[in-house]
């Protein structure tokens, strides 16, 4: 297992189209999800949950996405509908991070949503530490209520994103990162 600081300094997203199987074992997935649930959570509200898409579930979710897309874009070429159908099929595992808020006198909704984001980042980091490529993505379908309903989200739930997990097929290139001198100030 890599050194934690070195892992955090060098972690990169891997494009789902540059992933292959096998995905995490059942034990590895349990570790990834356990780490995903171990995040700052003011009030112990657990304002998130996970949906696992693996095997045929990725195609079934893609059917939901494609049907909504086709209905809302009746003139779309068949090739565009097919792209939507395959949104979750590149990586062998996709984890949906569902975010919801609960009324609380000391924990505003924004803080609860940040906790869901921290959960997503922990999942990305855990998968990377286990030797997998990971990528946190959204897209129009992550915010479309008809898709969310079709994926089984409740009316008060949102999707913080999809974490795609698989074995990288090639080294991931780094992208430019901000210079600390441009983003850090002192009060």
Image: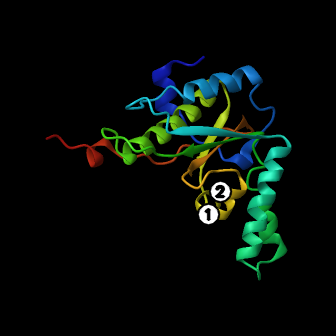
In the image, 183 versus 106, the foreground residue is: 106
Give the quadrant of residue 43: top left
- Where is mark 2, residue-wise? 148
Badge 1: residue crowd in 10 Å (few <14, some 14–19, many ≥20): some
In the image, 100 versus 60, the foreground residue is: 100
In the image, 83 versus 172, the foreground residue is: 83
Give the quadrant of residue 103: top left
Q: Is residue 172 at all visible to an observer of this figure? A: no
Asked whether the beta carbons under mark 1 and mark 2 sit within 8 Å of each other, the answer is yes
The quarter in which the C terminus is drawn is top left
- Where is mark 1, residue-wise? 144
* Residue 172 appears left or right of 74: left
In the picture as drawn, the residue positioned furthest to the bottom comes out as 75
Q: Is residue 116 at all visible to an observer of this figure? A: yes
- Kindly identify the residue that appears in the image at 77 percent across and 70 percent down: 80
Residue 61 is situated, as x and y percent measured from the top left of the image, at: 77, 52
- Kindly identify the residue that appears in the image at 64 percent across and 22 percent down: 31
In the image, 181 versus 26, the foreground residue is: 26
């Amino acid at each position: 297992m890599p050194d934690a600081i070195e892992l955090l300094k060098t972690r990169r997203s891997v494009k789902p189209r540059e992933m292959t199987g096998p995905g995490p074992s059942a034990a590895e997935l349990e570790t990834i999800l356990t780490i995903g649930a171990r995040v700052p959570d003011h009030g112990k509200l657990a304002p998130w949950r996970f949906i696992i898409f693996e095997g045929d579930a990725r195609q079934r979710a893609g059917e939901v996405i494609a049907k909504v897309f086709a209905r809302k874009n009746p003139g779309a070429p068949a090739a565009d509908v097919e792209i939507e159908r395959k949104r979750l099929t590149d990586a062998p595992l996709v984890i949906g991070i569902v975010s919801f808020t609960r009324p609380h006198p000391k924990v505003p909704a924004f803080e609860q949503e940040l906790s869901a984001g921290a959960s997503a980042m922990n999942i990305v980091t855990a998968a990377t530490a286990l030797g997998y490529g990971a990528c946190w993505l959204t897209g129009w379908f992550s915010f479309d209520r008809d898709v969310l309903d079709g994926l089984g989200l409740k009316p008060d739930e949102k999707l913080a994103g999809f974490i795609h997990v698989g074995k990288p097929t090639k080294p991931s290139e780094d992208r430019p990162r901000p210079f600390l001198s441009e983003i850090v100030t002192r009060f």
